[in-house]
Amino acid sequence: MNRKGRGSTSLSFGHVGWRRIVLLFTAAFFVAWFPFRGTPAAWSVVLIAITSLSLSALILASLSARQFGQGEPARLLWWMVALIGLTDTLVAVAFTLPGVVGMFKAAGVFTVVTTAIGSLSRIALAVALWMMIRVYRKGGLTVHLEKLDYAAIAIFAGVAVMSVILSGSVVRATLYISSPNLINWVRLAGIPSVVALVGCSVFGVMAWKYARQMGGGLVAKASRSIMVYAFLWVFRLGLLGALSYVYAMDPLHRPTWVRMIDFASILGAEYFLFLSASYQHEACTSDVVFDETEMEAFAQTFGRPLA
Amino acid sequence: MMWSVHGFDSHMPTQPGIKRNTGEFMARKCVFLLASSVGNDMAAKIVAEGLESLGLQAADLTVNNMPHLAGVIERALRSFVGDDKARRLASALRVLVGGVKIEIGREL
């Protein structure tokens, strides 16, 4: 019997250890951002923090996707998550680099292209969530949506549509750009996001209900983490859009709490993307080992003494 | 089906009627070994469907059936954890569940 004693090392322990270390680093980046807020150094902190998380998610999701055979929905699901990691990296670079180098007016076309890439990311997210539902259906699970689920879908879809409509305000507030032409182009580039985000709202709620039926486990944790990632992105875009539109905030004098929520929601979203890829990678690659605690729990539950 | 998905919950208290050398005990061990990857309820469903596809009930499970059951479970697991991990989990079922049965046989 392959049993692992307390304090011994194994791949599964390593996964848990890495997740804690990454969480500490993420928190450290958030704390480090405070003293530098409003300066180019703060943009550097944002850039490094987000790209570290999204690139980690890209690598782990790619490795997970390779574990599945051709034709498996989970293979496409994890390739889509890897694509989200890549697009989020590109978006982070495009949105923060002008701030890092202090060339806000140079953002121009780069911002429009990045918004289009962001739309691609949301499409990838919708496809990923649909593939997740296909994985659960293949496993024989079924789901029945209730009134509360439809309400959740309507709220998420409403916030998602609002976030795209108000994307011009977000660009003004985050990049200090006020050119009407550019803002219109940003809105145009974000149109595919509307369809994708409505899809994400429907599939996200369905996938959440499927994941609940699994009764825990690494695969369900991976699924839920993707959904938290989606929710945080929608929440961030919706909130920033609404604040910028309703209060017409002067971008150069945005309250610190708005910047804090902005950074925290992006950082949180990317951490959950990493977490999702990390859980799935552990589910696909960890050793089949059971520690003493698990074996004792089983023995106590079923009355068999541990050998 | 003699038992439901929920009847396999590994957190439920010991049932006095279930002896550790029965097929039901082996089925519960299968669920326990898969639960950390795919969750308790999904593991129970996979094992239940595996047994059903072999035309067995949990109580009928023996060491001789384990290789066949492990094969069916491996195919079901591929969608969730990939080919390699599914193969390794199926091997673990053959060794840990089948092996324990032999050990219990000696005790008896």
Image: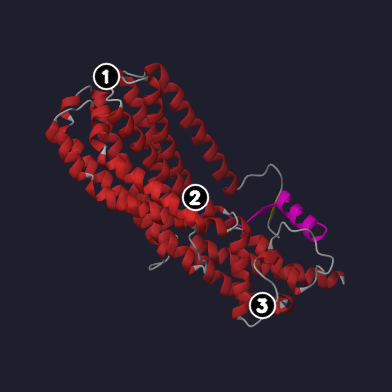
| Residue A281 seen | no
Q: State how far apart marks 2 and 3 are (Cα).
A: 31 Å
Q: Is residue B50 left or right of residue A158?
A: right
Question: Which label was assigned to residue A252?
Answer: 1
Question: Which label was assigned to residue B1?
Answer: 3
As shown in the figure, which amino acid type bears the numbered disc 1?
A: Leu
| Residue A13 seen | yes
- Relative to the observer, which residue lies in front, A90 or A3? A90
Q: Are marks 2 and 3 on the same chain?
A: no
Q: Residue at x 32, y 18 (%)?
A: A38
Q: Residue at x 25, y 32 (%)?
A: A169
As shown in the figure, which amino acid type bears the numbered disc 2?
A: Arg
Q: Residue at x 27, y 44 (%)?
A: A118
Q: State how far apart marks 1 and 2 are (Cα).
A: 37 Å
Magenta-span inclusion, residue A71: no
Q: Residue at x 37, y 36 (%)?
A: A236
Q: Residues within 10 Å of mark 1 (few under 14, many from 20)?
A: few
Q: Which residue is mark 2?
A: A224
Q: Which secondary structure, mark 2?
A: helix
Label 3 chain ID: B
User: Where the N terminus of chain B falls, by quadrant?
Assistant: bottom right
Q: Is residue A166 left or right of residue B25?
A: left
Where's residue A35, x and y in %?
Answer: 41, 16
Mark 1 and mark 2 lie on one chain; the one further toward the N terminus is 2
